[in-house]
Image (cartoon, helix red, strand yellow):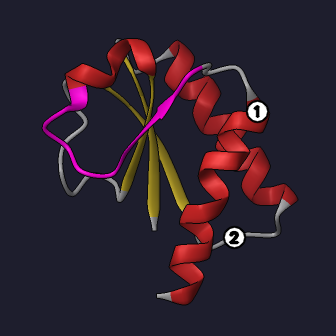
Amino acid sequence: MKIAAVCGSGLGSSFMVEMNIQGILKDLGVNNVETAHFDVGSAMEGSADYFFVGKDLADSLSNLKNVIVLDSIIDKKELKEKLEPLLTNQSQG
C-alpha cells in the first residue's frame, strides 16, 4: 500500500503530514506501507492508493479516488483516526 500526502506546492505541509504518517505507522509497528508527498498537480491515480489532503484543497483532488480529507493537517490524533481503518482494511484484504 502507498499513502501520499498532498498540498499546494508539494513541499511544506505535505512533507509534514507524510512524516506524521510515518511516525504513526512506526508507533503501530506497521512497516509494509510506502509513503510519499505530492503537489496537487502531481497527484494522480496510480501514484498512491490513498491521498491525504487538507480540507482547503479537497476540491482540487475531486478527480481522484480514495481521498481522505483532514480538517486539520497538524492534528495527529485526527490523522491516526483516519489512517487506522485503512491499515485494518489492508490487513483484511
Q: Which residue is mark 1?
A: 76
Residue furthest right in the image: 27
Q: What is the three-letter code of the residue carrying label 2?
A: Asn
Residue 66, horizontal then vertical, whole percent: 33, 52
Q: Residues within 10 Å of mark 2 (few under 14, many from 20)?
A: few
- Whole-number angstrom distance, CA of label 1 to CA of label 2: 19 Å
Q: Which residue corresponds to the image point at 34% horizontal and 17% vertical from the top-left? A: 57
Q: Amino acid at mark 1?
A: Lys
What residue do we see at 70% from left, 35% from top? 78
> Against 5, is 65 above or below?
below
Identify the magenta region. Answer: 61-71
- Circle 1 sits in a helix, a strand or a loop, which is it? helix
Pointer 2 residue: 31
| Residue drawn 78% across the image and 46% down it | 23
Q: Quadrant of the N terminus?
A: bottom left
The residue located at (52%, 77%) in the rendering is 90
Q: Residue furthest left?
A: 63
Q: Relative to 2, is 75 above or below?
A: above
